[in-house]
Amino acid sequence: MEPIIAPRKPVKRSRGRDRKRMPALAKQGKGSIVMSGLRGINANGFGQSYASRGMRALSSRLQRLERTSLKRERTAPQSARAADPDAQKYNLLLAERRQLRSSSSDAASRRHLETLLQDLDSRPMLAVTAPDRPERMPTMTTRLVGVAPDIDANTVTYQQSSGEVPIFGARVVVDVDRESKALVAVNGQLAPPPVRPAIARLSPIEAWRRLADWCAAPANLTDPAVAPTLTWYVDDAGTEYLTYRFRNTQLTPPKGDEVERDADPVACVRHARPGLCSYDYLVDAEDGSIRYYFASAPHFVPSPMCGIDCANELRKFYGLKVGESYILNDPQRDIVTYDYKFGNISEEPIPALPETAMPFPNHDIGDASPAAVSAHWHATLVFDFFNDVLKRNGIDDRGMKLVSVVNVYSGDDTSPTRPQWGNAAWWRNAMWYGQEKDATGTLMSFARHLDIIAHELTHGVTSSSSNLVYRDLPGALNESFSDIFGVFIANWYPEPKPVQDWNWEIGAGLGRNGGALRNFANPAAVGQPDHMRHYEPLPEYQDYGGVHRYSGIHNRAVHGIVTALDGDGQPIIPIRDAALLFYLTLVRLTPTSNFSAARRTLETVAGVYYADDPRREERLKAISEGYDAVGIV
Ligand SMILES: [Zn+2]
């Protein structure tokens, strides 16, 4: 697994002397594949379009062709020019370059990689890039597009996976010229796609126990902080193993390996600070043997923390130990919670956030800040739901940091009710929580409402996916989807409740006369219309055209769909399916979708989802009936 990193050469733009040197450099500009378990793949393009060998030779004749075709233009008739094979190739090459220039860095990089693998005539590697569909490389997942400023190029990183399962260490970084999108360099390692299906014989928890045994962990060891991910591991001999990857565990490898590891001075430094040392393990998903392990980056060690929340319950969550303090920063989920100390967000500019997440002297913070515990713990639940149930990587599906700010005030500085601010908001990519006094005069944070938090964070999901406009029916749909995941998440933890026991209210105690804000089962109970026959368009200035008014109609359809039971009293659409189907619908809607568009999209998505299901028609009927009942056609 030794990658050979080719030096990255800057793109030469200047004319004259440098330009004359290009042919000599271009001779080195070919790729290489180093055989081992993973195959190192490296190439330089020196700013030239890295086409196949034949095309490259042609490329060096560009100027000559340019001259001769100009000459021909003056002398030869149109038909003769069209028949000239050189001129045809020349035009093809020009067209290709033009197309490359206008394509995205990602598309250009994929094409370069494809061409490179073809050029190296690597049969097993070609399977990686699906030669029958050159525009797609289904096993390559884009991980990141960034600009590497020193070489004036865009850097695109790919993680190779087989299906959904990543291959450990198999990554390729492609640098393309920022303007022409010509290849600058390729560096990385790839693996021939595994031939076996990714079916694990052990459960994650069985694998965890094998690992704990191997590490001789104490008997009271808790479950891993974050569930492991299935990962292909290819050893140096090229044998592939399906493994579970446990990240940042607090388990130390057995002593037998200690001597060898301490011989490495870098490992010594890490080992000198045992509190900061954690390990990643790849545990065979078939026989439980430990295939590979390594010390994780020292600053990414989550520390288990606990504390009392607003409901007076003890909650367990993760933070980070920094020096002698524990801060509310979960490095695995990237969830950070700040104390705003009643700063006023109505000021312009608003007070800055503190430099670090909220610090505490002990991992058990007791009742030092119920607001912070509620905010941090609830953010964890919402993250886990998006991640585990919806398979979404954070709010924006790109691993966005989840920031919560507690003890926030908004309003008049001299108000006698300060610091009471009875609200919470998703604003500037963060959650801001106010607080109100309860009957005993104690300040209670809005962070105590999991359903409200899930509602607000779902607005973040919507704005980074379908981006439904916040007006009229699309706006009411936007509100409804926030309500949907608000109600799902609130009924999901600590364990998903049977649908018969669900609480269908949102914001209990926050509505008029101490009632709820929303009621899926009976929108009329909170003053919302519950059927399309009551819909009348409202002016924009009136609640953005009624976004909080008409959401109840769609909510009631959702209630009907989720609570439709079969003859055995079981939900016709299991709640886990329902969550996924509503999510898949949300991300397929367009900014101006209305309720009918949502119905059609959900029906299409469910039709595909249940394609091979013997109960498909019954399930689709539950959806149609749910919408019919509220007049959404
Ligand atoms: Zn809302």
Image (cartoon, rainbow, N blue to C red):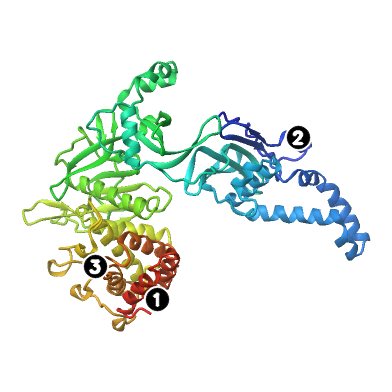
Residue 525: numbered disc: none
Vertical placement of 295 versus 611: above or below?
Answer: above
Q: Nearer the viewer, residue 385 or 213?
A: 213
Residue under label 3, please give it.
Answer: 569
Q: Which amino acid does the dot numbered 2 rest on? A: Lys
Residue under label 2, please give it.
Answer: 27
Quadrant position of the N terminus in the picture: top right
Label 2: state its secondary structure. Answer: helix
Disc nearest the viewer among 3 and 1:
3
Q: Which amino acid does the dot numbered 3 rest on? A: Gly
Q: Nearer the viewer, residue 513 or 607?
A: 607
Residue drawn at point x = 42 percent, y = 29 percent: 294
Residue under label 1, please give it.
Answer: 596
Vertical placement of 106 versus 528: above or below?
Answer: above
Distance, label 3 to label 1, CA atoms, is: 29 Å
In the image, is 275 to the left or to the right of 124?
A: left
